[in-house]
Every structure is written in C-alpha cells, then in structure tokens.
Image (cartoon, grey):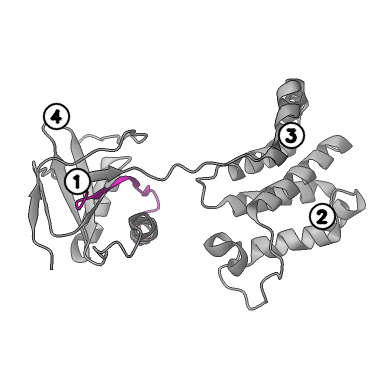
Amino acid sequence: MRQLNNYVTIAEPVSDFFVSYEVSPPVRDSRPLNYVKTDKRYLFELRFRSDFDLALFDKVIQDSPVRMVEYQAANRKVRYFMTDSRMPDDGSVDPWTWVNDELPRIGAAIGLHFLHFTLPACRCVIDLDGKTGPEASPPDFKMKVLGQTNMPDFNRVMKDSSAFSPYATRCESDNNFKEALLYFGLSLDIDRENRWASLYRAYEVVADCAGGNDGLLRLGYCSNSELNRFRRTCNHQEAVGAFSRHARLRTEPPPDPMDIEEALQFIAGLIGKWHESGNPV
C-alpha cells in the first residue's frame, strides 16, 4: 500500500495543444487546491473543452473508482488531474493504454444522456515515481520512417508539384471526388483511431460513383481479389481490431488481411483510376 503524499509542484509536458473554453455563468463550483494529495503513482491531466464538459465529468465520476483533483499552481493556472484506484502502480500496465480505454467509457456513460458532451483530452501522464520527481509524459508522437523503397515516389513528387493541381481543380466541380479525398486524407492521420473506417468510406464513395462493386471491376479500377481482401479486412474485428466496421462477426477473419499501408495504397489506386477515367458520376 502506497502512502499518501502531497505534491505541490507538478511537472508539465513540453507542448500544450488543447484550449479550455469557459462559460458564464459557471456551472460548477471551482475548488482548486495548491497541492495534489494521492497514494497513486500516475496522474492523468485532462483538458476540457468547456465548463459544461468539466461539470458533467466531475458529477459522473463521484461514485466511481476515478477521482479528480483541481490543482492551482503558483502561476495561478488551474489544471485537472484524474487518478484511478484500479490502475496498477508497478508499471505492468501502460498508463496511456489505460487512459485511452477508460476515458471513452466514462464519456459514453455521459453521452448516452447528454449527446453534446465532448470527451476531454489527456494532456499528459504524470509519473510520481520519476527519478527526478514528478515527470510529465506527453502523448506519443507517432512517426513514419521512410525507407529507400519510398525514395522514387518522394523524388517524383518533389520534381513535379503540378501533379497536385488536377485534383484540386476537380474538387471544385465534383463534390463526390472532394468527399472521397476528404476521407482518404483523414486516413493519413496516424493518430486517428478510426483510419480503417475513413478508408472504407472513401471506397464507398468511389464504388457508388462507379456503379457499385461490379462497376469497379468492369472499369478496371481494381481486381476482384484485391477488393474482397480490402473489404474483408475492414469488416472483421480480428483483422483491424476495435475499429472494424463490425463489432462482432461469426465469419472467419481473412487469412491474409491487409495492413494499413496496403489499404492506403489500394484506396489511392481506386481514386487515381477514378480520376484518370474522368468519370464524374
């Protein structure tokens, strides 16, 4: 059993991308302390988009294992920290995995009754067992690593920037094409959890404009095996996890599911063939 300790100075992450918007009149009583008292190893700093969200969150967790502390540092800046009595202190569970699982569950309980609730963001995780005192860990910054096989494409794009113009021009006159590019663009965000859903939506737009799956095949946009492999991957939770189109399926998962890079290439190919055909509908 860990001992309760008062933490007066709490580390902050290097960067801060979230802004909280306050409303007037206030919808909850503010009660900041100049210290955080806890026997838990991890603090999760939350950033709320409005006082309504803060008030709802604070109300819902009152009878749960989750506790929230309102902390006011010496610079008068108020910060909100969440602890969870179920979170192990021995490092056996990644704290980011924990908060990314638990926050949506709390948010869902609120959203079922108040759909305008916006899920708070976790600004950072504070490790109170840090070697130099409380250490702040910002969210993971994911990166793509380019290999030598990527360089020909990179060089081609760098040498011919005019290749982008036809796509932008078509978006001005073709709303379907613009919609497909939007979904494809969302799937390029490596921090986005539902990249597969965005890719599937892009496919649906192209397929709809081509006359369905038969149209895709007839026009030569893709092969039947490629199409089936993509659709089966997106549709099965054992292939792409929680963000498949279906939560539960009795069918067998695809034997050779696409990875995300293959799926991106497949959709890019569909959009490219569609654009080359000049067929707006």
Which mark identifies residue 75?
A: 4
The mark nearer the N terminus, 3 or 1, is: 1
Identify the residue at horizontal 82%, vertical 57% (top origin): 213
Asked if marks 3 and 1 touch (Cβ < 8 Å), the reply is no
The mark nearer the N terminus, 4 or 2, is: 4
Identify the residue at horizontal 25%, vertical 38% (top origin): 12
Distance of mark 3 from mark 1, alpha carbons? 45 Å
Q: How many residues crowd around disc 3 within 10 Å: few (fewer than 14), some, or many (20 or more)?
A: few
Which mark identifies residue 29?
A: none
The mark nearer the N terminus, 1 or 4, is: 4
Q: Nearer the viewer, residue 218 or 52?
A: 218
Distance of mark 4 from mark 3, alpha carbons? 49 Å
Q: Amino acid at mark 1?
A: Pro
Asked if marks 1 and 4 touch (Cβ < 8 Å), the reply is no
Which mark identifies residue 134?
A: 1
* Residue 39 lies in the magenta stretch: no
